[in-house]
Image (cartoon, rainbow, N blue to C red):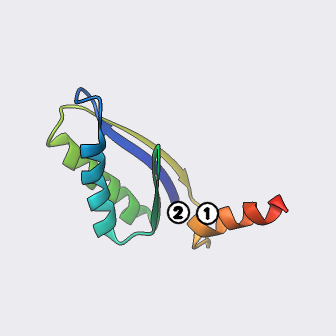
Amino acid sequence: MLVDFSISPIGKDESLSRYVAQVYKLVEVSGLPHEYHAMGTNIEGDWDAVMGLIKECRDLLLREADRVSISIRIDDRKGVTDGLARKVRSAREKMG
């Protein structure tokens, strides 16, 4: 399963990098394959592991803010692994 998610506290400073850094630490410790991008994070793993990590991130930010916004997109396809690299590689090969 591939998941693209972003999470941020509501009602905090204009710059959220301090909170993003805290979330990054949880993602790193999880051991799940991941990629950061300017608008969020891609994670690969099974449902329970990925959703458990997102819950940990939510719980962390709710300790510092009264409100948290989370956006999640999921691509769940049976039998597919290494989706983070495979999907990009496949598209690049078709570029010619």
- Relative to 57, residue 84 above or below: below
* Quadrant in which residue 9 is drawn: top left
Q: Amino acid at mark 2?
A: Met
Residue closer to the observer: 17 or 91: 17
Residue drawn at (53%, 59%) of the image: 2
Locate the C terminus and report the quarter of the image it occupies.
bottom right
Q: Neighbour class for label 1 at 10 Å: few (<14), some, many (≥20)?
A: few
Residue that label 1 marks: 77
Q: Secondary structure at mark 1?
A: loop
Horizontal side, residue 81 vs residue 61: left or right: right
Q: Amino acid at mark 1?
A: Arg
Residue that label 2 marks: 1
Q: Position of residue 77 (x, y in %)?
A: 61, 63
- Relative to 42, residue 66 above or below: above
Q: Position of residue 13 (x, y in %)?
A: 23, 30
Horizontal side, residue 44 vs residue 92: left or right: left
Furthest residue in direction top, as rendered: 11
Q: Secondary structure at mark 2?
A: loop
Horizontal side, residue 12 vs residue 77: left or right: left
Q: Position of residue 25 (x, y in %)?
A: 27, 60
Furthest residue in direction left, as rendered: 63
Figure label count: 2
Q: Neighbour class for label 2 at 10 Å: few (<14), some, many (≥20)?
A: some
Furthest residue in direction right, as rendered: 96
Dots 2, 1 in contact, CB < 8 A: yes
Q: CA distance from mark 2 to mark 1?
A: 6 Å
Residue drawn at (32%, 59%) of the image: 53
